[in-house]
Image: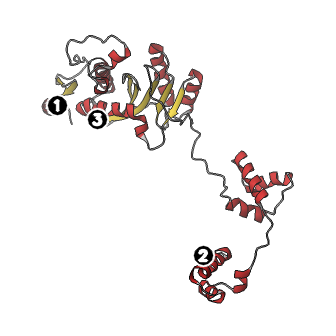
Amino acid sequence: MVTPDAKRNAVAHARDCHGLSERRACDLIGIARRVARYQPSRADDAGLRQRLRELAAERRRFGYRRLGYLLAREGLAPNHKKLLRIYREEGLKVRRRGGRKRALGTRAPMTLPQGPNQRWSLDFVSDALGCGRRFRILCVVDDFTRECLALVADTSLSGGRVARELDAIIALRGKPLAVVSDNGTELTSTSILRWSQERQVEWHYIAPGKPTQNAFVESFNGRLRDECLNETLFTSMAQARAVLATWRQDYNTIRPHSKLGGRTPAEIAGMPPTPLPSHQPSAINIEDSPSEWIHSGEHVTFSWRRILETGLMR
């Protein structure tokens, strides 16, 4: 409470609420009586403030000096000190840009899809090879059928690579009406913005820090990590891609989905399921693969005892 206006308000409050005299209230607040009695004689600046707000809304990158030039052209020419004071009192400022320009997309509320190929969801999952090298997996899911449309694994997945993978899916099943994703750098790049404009596909970005708005693919990511990634030791990218392809086929055509009444995504999508010899995916033949490959559950994994015996973990 250092400004004269604040002290005047404090004096008025002390007199009204506590019944103090003007002299006593001024002594307690620390303000001269003549200052407390002062009545400001400023002209009404309502018109200037309104026009300043309108110009600031139209020219968001203009500071108070440049806005002052525009006001002067209209006959409103306050000095620079008064203009700066009003500019600050109105809470106007040029916001600092937060990094590079990103794709904006839409943030309107989404409706649930009513059929296949109406809305796809995208997200990334990360894992590591046995040597410690990290790699990422692009997951694409149809929100209506719960079908996994793609699992793309690589050490680097740029926005251009994501656009090419989406084109490959569209070539097989047609384009969706909308795509949902988070605000990752790959998915907000100019490549994705250009792709969505050229393909006439609406791209919806969820609110930052709200992964539940992309719940379909987040649920899928949990199943992928629990049933495949956490159960498999990857030795190479070729092996990782082969394991993911087999698990994706099993997920779409064999694995029952609780939200689909025990049916598979392929049945919901109207696709004939690919016949498999059993409920387990077939063994994967990879060149130079060790003899320690065994079946475990619904995927292929290593025998840890044989790995330690043969020294593969060194």
Q: Which mark is residue 307?
A: 1
| Cα separation between marks 2 and 3 | 63 Å
Residue at figure coordinates x 43%, y 42% from the top left: 210
Q: Which residue is mark 3?
A: 131
Q: Position of residue 21 (x, y in %)?
A: 63, 87
Based on the displayed image, in which of its 4 quarters is residue 117 positioned? top left
Q: Is residue 117 above or below residue 311?
A: above
Name the residue that disc number 2 marks.
1
Horizontal side of 299 relative to 150 (left or right) equals left
Determine the CA span between mark 3 and mark 1: 14 Å
Of the residues shown, which amino acid type is indicated by label 3? Cys
Q: CA distance from mark 2 to mark 1?
A: 73 Å
The image position of residue 297, as x and y in percent, is: 19, 25
Label 2 vs 3, first from the N-terminus: 2
User: Which residue appears at 67% of the width and 77% of the height?
Assistant: 4
Q: Is disc 3 placed on a helix, strand or loop? A: loop
First reached walking from the N terminus: tag 2 or tag 1: 2
Q: For the N terminus, which image quadrant?
A: bottom right
| Label 2 vs label 3, nearer the camera | 2
Report whether residue 218 is seen. Answer: yes
Residue 278 lies, with reference to residue 157, above or below; the image says above
Regarding mark 1 in the picture, which secondary structure is present there? helix
Query: Mark 2 and 3 residues: CB-CB less than 8 Å, in contact?
Result: no
Q: Secondary structure at mark 2?
A: loop
The one of 8 and 86 positioned closer to us in this rendering: 8
Amino acid bearing label 1: Ile
The residue at the point 57 percent across, 79 percent down is 17
Residue 294, label in figure: none
